[in-house]
Amino acid sequence: MSTEARNSVVTAMLDQMRGMVFNFARKFNLEFEDCLQHAALVMLEVWPRLPEDCRNIPAYLQACVRYKLYDYLRARQETLSLDRPVSPESTETFADMLEAFVEQETERTKRVIETVHRTLRKQSLEVQLHAAEFYKLGSYKPALPSVRRKVVYGRKQEHMRQSFRKALRRDRHVLALMK
């Protein structure tokens, strides 16, 4: 194809791709004009390599531009060190923040486990054994419930699970965890 045909197709494609390029630039916080200029350069670079049997040139160019914009994005990204301060005036690093988060999450997990175990201990021994097996509570050791009541053994497993779930929904400590 001639240079005039190339120029007209690239110009028309730039107009068609403005929305895609704008959304890309906005999504990744890039300059729209830089992305648009990069798209035009990509189309001009790809033009000589167009396959002979290419039936849909605009679609081919648009796919090439999309892939190259992601390459452009990857090239602009900088690596982030965990030892780098969060801000210039702060001495706290990203590693410190991550460690604090992990400690906080570990404490919360321990509280959740203790609460579930406390609630489960109020259930009958049969429900405790079934729940420990069904929910794979490896750290849970069943114990006789503190409340004595008549228990019918041989209940369906589904009914035992429903009983345990109902107890969880009613327990004030579990409700406090959910807030």
Image: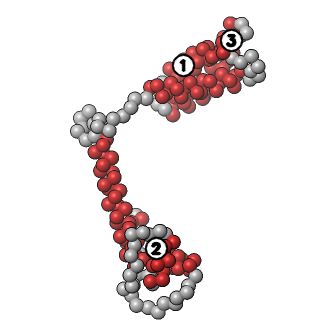
The answer to whether residue 128 of the structure is visible from this angle is yes
Q: Which mark is residue 6?
A: 3
Q: Quadrant of the C terminus?
A: bottom left
Q: Are marks 3 and 2 in contact (CB under 8 Å)?
A: no
Q: Could you say which quadrant of the image residue 47 lies in?
A: top right
Q: Where residue 89 sits in the image (x, y, percent)?
A: 23, 35
- Placement of the N terminus among the 4 image quadrants: top right
Q: Quadrant of residue 8?
A: top right
Q: Is residue 88 left or right of residue 129?
A: left
> Which element is circle 1 on?
helix
Which residue shows up at 63% across the image and 16% down it?
A: 46
Residue at image point 49% right, 32% down: 28
What's the distance in space between the residues labelled 3 and 2, CA to CA? 70 Å
The residue under label 2 is 132
Question: How much space separates mark 1 and mark 2, taking CA atoms?
Answer: 59 Å
- Ranked by sequence position, the earlier of labels 1 and 2 is 1
**Above or below 132: residue 48:** above
Residue 53, compared with residue 77, is above or below; it is above
Q: Nearer the viewer, mark 3 or mark 2?
A: 2
Q: Amino acid at mark 3?
A: Arg
Q: Which residue is mark 1?
A: 38
Q: Position of residue 144 (x, y in %)?
A: 39, 85
Q: Pick whichever, 140 or 147, lies toward us.
A: 140
Graded by Cα atoms within 10 Å as few (under 14), some (14 to 19) or many (20 or more), the crowding at tag 3 reads: some
- For this rendering, which residue is in front, 90 or 77? 77
- Disc 1 marks a residue whose amino acid type is His
Badge 2 density bin: few <14, some 14–19, many ≥20, Cα 10 Å: some
Residue 176 visible, this angle = no
- Residue 82, quarter of picture: top left
Q: Earlier in the sequence, mark 3 or mark 1?
A: 3
Q: Exactly how many numbered labels are in the figure?
A: 3
